[in-house]
Amino acid sequence: MLGMKTVFITGASSGIGFACAEIFAREKYNLLLASRRVDRLHAMATDLQNKYGVQIHAIGLDVRDKNLVQKVWNELPENWKVIDVLINNAGLSQGLEPIQEGNTDDWDRMIDTNLKGLLYVTRAVAPAMQERKTGHIINIGSIAGKEVYPNGNVYCSTKHAVDALTKAMRIDLLPYNIKVTSVDPGAVETEFSVVRFKGDRERAKKVYEGFTPLSAEDVAEAIWFAASRPPHVNVNDLLLMPTAQATSTLFHKEP
Ligand code: NDP
Ligand code: 8X3
């Protein structure tokens, strides 16, 4: 590990987190990867280790489980606790109903993952950054954290909260030379809509019809841009949209 940097990516089994793993491995970072589907992480680890020769540690983690997050962190080998970049990426949307028809279990899943999970992971990792007086926390927000759209109620609220937390973290961690960045994408074609529509792949596919959405790699490159600035430069907030998307609901779609 000596001389190499380490990135901790939550939600690395798919989409943006998966693409970040590849890019940071390409840039010779060691990878600490977490998600619930640990089998996927193990497959990736073998592949990326062979390709880039970096070290990879994969952990099965549900970020909603406060005690588990702290236990997993406490039990990590000491050399894996030296985190240079934390990417708080694990997140999801569930359902798309007006507030009066919303499924309260869906609400819990979004709040517990996008908001509380991000807090638990940060609470575990930040003290070691504080001690070392260096580190970078990158929170994955969304255009949904800047605007509210019809039926986006609770998902948008969680991402607005991530926006507020990013600003709050930047203030609290200022004395310790810790960078805090928010990367906020518009529509990215990943498993996101399949998860939102609970496995309805046809409905998910329709979200991205008629225009070119961002790819997970587009977003990962933006995250890498933020992570690779010189020590005196922090990217506070990076809002990244498909060219064909002007707001959360306004798209230029070809028939
Ligand atoms: P994906 O569904 O492809 O990936 C989501 C990742 O989060 C998966 O690796 C999943 O892993 C992980 N995850 C979900 N719940 C948990 C949990 N409880 N504990 C640990 N890991 C979890 O979607 P994206 O890559 O698109 O999403 C990544 C982030 O980007 C999210 O925060 C999302 O809100 C945000 N975003 C997405 C946009 C889009 O249009 N796609 C736009 C703007 C922001 P596993 O299921 O194995 O646990
Ligand atoms: C995901 C983008 O606009 O579908 O955060 O909510 S959106």
Image (cartoon, rainbow, N blue to C red):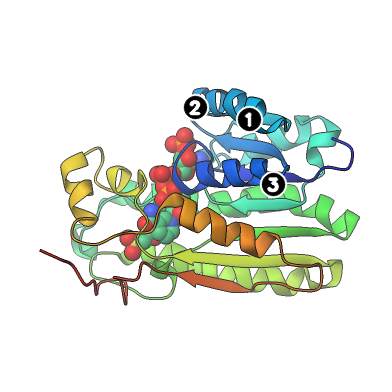
Position of residue 224 relative to residue 253, above or below, is above
Q: Please tell me whether mark 2 or mark 1 is closer to you in this view.
A: 1
Q: List x then y, in percent, for residue 223.
A: 59, 59
Q: Which residue is mark 2?
A: 40
Of the pair 105 and 193, the residue shown nearer to us:
193
Q: Secondary structure at mark 1?
A: helix
**Residue occupying image coordinates x 49% and y 63%:** 141
**Residue occupying image coordinates x 58% and y 41%:** 22
- Please report whichever mark, 2 or 1, sits nearer to the chain's N-terminal start: 2
Q: Which residue is mark 1?
A: 51
Is 155 placed left or right of 244 in the picture? right
- Please report whichever mark, 2 or 3, sits nearer to the chain's N-terminal start: 3
Determine if the C-beta at disc 1 is less than 8 A from ligand 1.
no
Q: Secondary structure at mark 3?
A: loop
The image quarter in which residue 231 lies? bottom right
**Residue occupying image coordinates x 31% and y 66%:** 153
